[in-house]
Amino acid sequence: MRYWLMKSEPSEYSIDDLARDGSVAWFGVRNYQARNFMRDQMKPGDLAFFYHSSCEQPGIAGICEISKAAYPDATQFDPSSKYYDPKATPDNPRWFNVEVRFKRKTRLLPLSELRAHPELAQMRILQRGNRLSITPVDPREWAFIERLL
DNA sequence: GCCAACGTTGGC
DNA sequence: GCCAACGTTGGC
């Protein structure tokens, strides 16, 4: 079992939206590294921090669980979607998504607080220029962060 | 809104 | 296969 951190802009989809919906398809990822994590490594039962990005207070807002393994992202085939990819076909899909299920909302643990802990200095999300929307979290980092929540 | 950092594209 | 140009991300 693995641990992850998944970013979402709360103006697009927030932890409250997930709490309301129960579970959701994590569609719209258009980065190969992030796709590969979903397609090749994420398994049902894995846990993820739900991270709010590009907002007033970026940080960890909750915890969710991978509830369904990756399958082709339907939006890549939909010309009316902003995630449409003309090079993708149902026979040869390019993008995949998992589904995640709400576990719990946490206090908002701000990015600045994550940065303040030397124990977390190696986290991908804290590295300079980091832009990946899905990153693995080390089990020790996970346990450390859970105690802060 | 700014801008540094990064990924992707496409001409050669 | 190189690399400049471009678009996007995301904290501030």
Image (spheres, coloured by chain):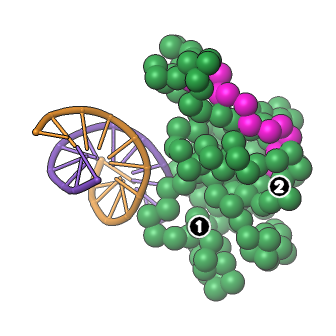
Chain colours: A green, B orange, C purple
Give the letter of the chain under mark 1: A
Magenta stretch: helix, strand or loop mostly = strand
Where is the C terminus of chain A found, in terms of image quarters?
A: bottom right
Please name the residue that numbered disc 1 is placed on. Answer: A124
Residue A35, position as x, y percentages in the image: 61, 43
The three-letter amino acid code for the residue at tag 2 is: Leu
Q: In this view, does A114 lie above or below A45?
A: below
Q: Which residue is drawn at 53% across and 44% down?
A: A32
Mark 1 touches mark 2? (CB < 8 Å):
no
Q: Which residue is drawn at 56% across and 50% down?
A: A33
Q: Is residue A34 magenta?
A: no
Please name the residue that numbered disc 2 is placed on. Answer: A47
> Residue A124 sits in which quadrant?
bottom right
Residue A144, position as x, y percentages in the image: 79, 77
| Nearer to the camera, A76 or A63 | A76
| Nearer to the camera, A72 or A91 | A91
> Residue B3 sits in which quadrant?
bottom left
Residue A6, position as x, y percentages in the image: 67, 51
Query: With A143 as the anchor, is A125 left or right in this view?
Result: left
| Nearer to the camera, B10 or A84 | B10
Give the letter of the chain under mark 2: A
The three-letter amino acid code for the residue at tag 1 is: Arg
Where is the N terminus of chain A found, in terms of image quarters?
A: bottom right
**For the magenta stretch, what is the residue range?**
A61-76
Q: In this rendering, does residue A20 appear at all?
A: no
Q: In this rendering, does residue A144 appear at all?
A: yes
Residue A47, position as x, y percentages in the image: 82, 55
Q: Is residue B3 above or below residue A143?
A: above
> Residue A111 sits in which quadrant?
bottom right
Q: Residue at x 79, y 76 (%)?
A: A140
